Amino acid sequence: MLGRIEARRRHTVTEPAAAKPRTIRWYWEDFPVGNTREFGAMPVTREAILAFASQFDPQPFHMDDAAAEASLFGKLSASGWHTCAMSMRMMCDEYLLESSSLGSPGIDSLRWTQPVLVGDVLSVRMTVVEARPMNSRPKVGLILSKWEVLNQGRDTVLTMQGWGMFGRREPAAG
Amino acid sequence: MLGRIEARRRHTVTEPAAAKPRTIRWYWEDFPVGNTREFGAMPVTREAILAFASQFDPQPFHMDDAAAEASLFGKLSASGWHTCAMSMRMMCDEYLLESSSLGSPGIDSLRWTQPVLVGDVLSVRMTVVEARPMNSRPKVGLILSKWEVLNQGRDTVLTMQGWGMFGRREPAAG
């Protein structure tokens, strides 16, 4: 069963990129400073928390109810890296997969402000903080974004500010 | 098959914590400023890159060889969040699971400095940058750590600096 899933995943992964070129809707120019969008509705299940924690962050408060209750979190909570990964998936689905995204050099600050719990539903509010051409690459621009990740009660569970590289619709002259 | 794996995982997760209390070897006092350790030998497989990317970061350069070759990375590369997660696992295995770790408020800076490729073997060099008591909690201390993640060629692929909260062996007086 696992083997078949792996095989199907590999198939899905390698086929469409060759067969069906992506449509790029958003280039660097389409992320003006001040632009805000809110998106996503990612349910957080116990199974997903345990699966991620088992693989990458098996600290007791991410793995066991009793240990979590005795911890600062008070309840079983998702690894902070899992929250980052779930947020990334929401960004991909909302805009990155239809953009000229070229990756990210890094994150300037990241704060896990509230525990992410079983049953939470996460969303993302993104704001463009800064946009500038990349001097060394005339076809590329940089975007500094602020992301606030919210739960269903509108508590902020994660804030990040970081850079993304995007292809330009119109490369710089010269 | 998946169901059985899930059941076994849940079993593994919930049983030992109750049956076998953890031994804590490292408290806040055991991370003095300047302390350095190097650890880990995490192999990066194609399957792991595709599995993480499929779930959390399905951008073409993390999913498809041809798209990756046409990208800034030049080859299929791991999601940056996957590199963070693999690094976290190495930290857990080296010291966090045997420590009084209480979680992390956040990361001050994070840089993905080189792509992580199929066949890489990652390790971590950790240095304690700052240590101070937590004013609001006399039983807790804060540690500011710098982590450099290296590949088998000693290239730095990720740097992070961030805070961890640890229980103190001897709580502050008063």
Image (cartoon, coloured by chain):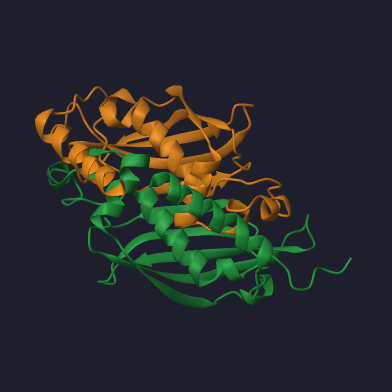
Chain colours: A orange, B green
Which percent across, then down, holds residue A147?
48, 34
| Residue B93 at least partly seen | yes
Work out whether residue B108 or residue B158 is closer to the camera in this orientation and state it.
Answer: B158
Q: In the figure, is residue B29 to the left or right of A162? A: right
- The residue at the point 62 percent across, 43 percent down is A115
Residue A76 horizontal/vertical position (percent): 63, 46
Residue furthest out toward the right: B174
Q: Quadrant of residue A170?
A: top left
Q: Give the number of marks.
A: 0
Q: Residue at x 67, y 65 (%)?
A: B19
Asked if B67 appears above or below B113 in the picture, the reply is above
Given residues A82 and A15, the one toward you in this image is A15
The foreground one among B8 and B98 is B8
Side (left or right) of B167 relative to A117: right
Q: Relative to residue B118, is residue B28 drawn left or right? A: right
Q: Tell me residue A161's x, y (percent).
A: 47, 41
Q: Position of residue A160 (x, y in %)?
A: 49, 41
Res. B90 image quadrant: bottom left
Question: What residue lies at 68% left-to-right and 45% top-to-bottom?
Answer: A75
Residue A135 visible to the viewer: no
Image quarter in which the C terminus of chain B is found: bottom right
Answer with the quarter of the image where residue A22 lies: top left
Rendered position, B129 above or below B161: below
Name the residue: 10% across, 35% down.
A18
